Amino acid sequence: MKRVNGVRVFEDKDFAWLRVLNCLRNTNMSLKKIKEYFELAQKGDDSLQHRYEIILEQEQNIKDQIKDLKYHLKELEYKKWYYETAIQEGSENVHKN
């Protein structure tokens, strides 16, 4: 990114970086970790392994979040069923047996 007459001018490489940084942020990666990733990328090929490890770690974090969300979704689906049947019968007593 450069400035021309005080206006930010983005180049194609800037958009690629913004896309990556936005992705990392949307996966709840901490700003500290994003900064580390960005700084490593500036070092070039010497940091490939470390950047790869950061991505693997974040991938596992996402998988863990998905697992947790699936669990919570099942709980909500149960409660939805519970209320639907209770409403249909006009009472929660339908679930006491």
Image: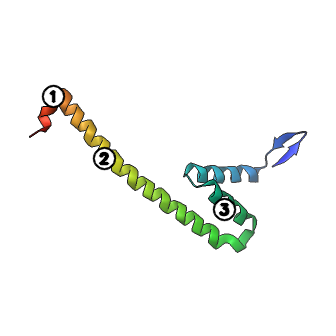
Please name whichever residue, 7 or 64, is drawn nearer the observer in this view of the structure.
Answer: 64
Q: Earlier in the sequence, mark 3 or mark 1?
A: 3
- Residue to which mark 3 is pinned: 37
Residue 91: assigned label: 1
Question: In the structure shown, which secondary structural element does the residue marked by tag 1 occupy?
Answer: loop
Q: Residues within 10 Å of mark 3 (few under 14, many from 20)?
A: some
The colouring scheme, among rainbow, by chain, secondary structure or one colour, is rainbow
Amino acid tagged 2: Lys
Point 75% across, 68% down: residue: 43
Nearest-to-viewer mark from 1 and 2: 1
Please state the horizontal and vertical placement of residue 95, each as a whole percent of the image: 14, 38
Is 47 above or below relative to 97? below
Question: In the structure shown, which secondary structural element does the residue marked by tag 2 occupy?
Answer: helix
- Residue to which mark 2 is pinned: 74
Point 63% across, 60% down: residue: 33
Please state the horizontal and vertical placement of residue 87, each as a whole percent of the image: 20, 27
Q: Residues within 10 Å of mark 2 (few under 14, many from 20)?
A: few
